[in-house]
Amino acid sequence: MAVMTWSAALMGCFSDAVWSVVLAGALGLLGGVLLVVGHRQRPSGLRPRTLFATLALACVLGAAVAVHCAVIAGNREKGPLAPAMAADDGIVIHILITGSPAPAPAPGHSSDGRWTVDASLIDLTSNGRVVRGTADIVVTGGAAWQNVRAGQSVRTTGTLKQVREGQPEAALLSASSAPVVTDSGFDARQTAADVRKRFVSAADWLPPDAAGLLPGMVTGDTSALPESLETAMQTTGMTHLTAVSGANCSLILGGFILLARCFRLPRPAAGIFAACGLFAFVMMVGPDPSVLRAAVMGAVGLAALTGGLRGRSLTFLCLATTILLLLDPAMAANVGFLLSILATLGIVLLAARIASWIPDWVPRWLAAGIAVPLSAQLLCGPVIVALQPQFTTFALIANVVAGPLVAPVTIFGTIAVALATALPWLAVVPIAVAGTCAGMVAGVARLFSGLPGAALAWAEGPVGIAAMVLSSVVTLLAVWMALHPADVKRRVMGLHGVVATRLDALLATREQGTTKHGRLESCKETSGRNHLWLLPKTPGPRASRRTPSVGGMRHRPPSS
């Protein structure tokens, strides 16, 4: 189901409304046909009815995603913003700020003094005509836009432009004037932004690396992150630690469940308590795609545990992916969401198996610490080189060393966020603990990024992606061979025996059963030899040979 919904979402994001409707109709028709065929099919071991029902449900969900994409495309093509975009004239627009300002990256990888923020349309005036409607837009403007807050209603002027394909917004507003606030309303997202800023201020007494990295690892605020440290994290493949990810959500959810068990809450109450805590954490850090994936996946698992059901992590991942794509099909084209799904999929499918390959004398926590980043990087590698064509040589060892430090940073940092709002003087201790661990993470990044060959050039485009896929497969095979030498020897010898037997049969067939130069055969396992080279016998009778004993021949004395 997840694969079907993702495919439909990708096709819908890069298609117009008409083709999205056609896709929805085709998937709906296919789902109906599968349902009818499954109903008429007799149950059997090869093609059970549940298979057809599952395929039909996947087609129906894909059709629903395609319909959602058609609505988004129709709003972009014929919505309230379409005439203004077609005219390409200056407009006066009234919008509601729905996000937090962020620097707008320029081609030179610097913000160039411009900022971007998400907003929602209230009304606009174009050529003396006032248009009211609902549409999501992205605003880019000068330095004055960094001071707007979520929940504010502002009025400005600018020009509407088309967004890139795959973006969920209806238009891009290039603001030509500073925003004029018309209403400062209350918004929970602005409250969360204030909490994040307060935490950044509370941690500014730490060393520069710790003060910049700690807010990013706990709340997702990377405004104080030094540029040199950000480069070091990219070189060592640790950029996922500079922001909140699914691992943080898992730790927070586990902490709330443990706290509920300490108070001996019943299962339903514990589930509600943990869900509320997870929701508050997501609101604080913001709805990042990887955070939403982890939150929905955790909520699905929490609902299953509350109901007394046990499921598999792969099932929870597929359900979370399907739900998020139904709500927002544009996530299918989001690279962060794709990396989050691939990393989780690699951990679910490979981590436990790789950990079981490691010898028993290695501690289990160390085996898990090696298996988890390795399994995640094996699946994320092709996507990463497509974005940044370079090979991070020390990514695995750097993540293994820094992995144990993530949990104390997340736990003590989250406690410090709550205390920094209510009791700032009491937040010093958890900030010190979390900041020390964050500083150690930064030290690991700087250490390995400074080693020779930390970042090697990699091929770009499809060639680089294919090479990384092959490299991931070879790496997995090499790890298995290194940890299973006995199995490798047994399989090689077995393959050798099979090849020798097949060659012998082939030679025997070609020579029509006659053998003049010997043949290669497999001996019995009890012979103590691997193979035996059998020489042909002499066709004539062979004369008997007797070897005299030491000292010459001795005649037996005649019997008396």
Image (cartoon, rainbow, N blue to C red):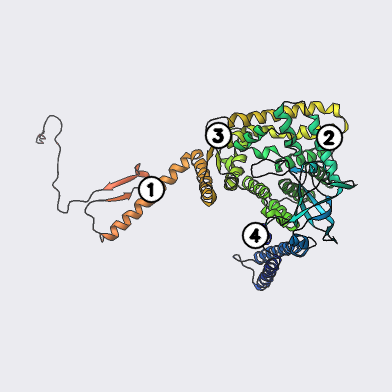
Q: Are marks 3 and 4 in contact (CB under 8 Å)?
A: no
- First-in-chain label (2 vs 4): 4
Q: Nearer the viewer, residue 382 or 521?
A: 382
Residue wearing tag 2: 418
- On the image, the x and y values in percent for residue 549 come to 15, 33
Q: Are marks 2 and 4 in contact (CB under 8 Å)?
A: no
Residue wearing tag 3: 454
Residue type at the position of mark 1: His
- Residue 415 seen in render: no
User: Disc 2 versus disc 1: distance between alpha carbons?
Assistant: 65 Å
Q: Which mark is residue 540?
A: none
- First-in-chain label (2 vs 3): 2
Q: Which mark is residue 7?
A: 4
Q: Quadrant of the N terminus?
A: bottom right
Disc number lying in front (2 or 3): 3
Who's the residue at 66% across and 46% down the image?
344
Left or right, residue 439 beside residue 477: right
- On the image, the x and y values in percent for residue 548 come to 13, 35
Q: Which mark is residue 496?
A: 1
Residue type at the position of mark 3: Ala
Disc number lying in front (4 or 1): 4
Q: Nearer the viewer, residue 181 or 282?
A: 181
- Residue 30 seen in render: yes
- First-in-chain label (2 vs 1): 2
- First-in-chain label (3 vs 1): 3
- First-in-chain label (4 vs 1): 4
- On the image, the x and y values in percent for residue 517 come to 22, 51
Q: Nearer the viewer, residue 541 or 292?
A: 292
Who's the residue at 46% across and 43% down the image?
488
Residue type at the position of mark 4: Ser
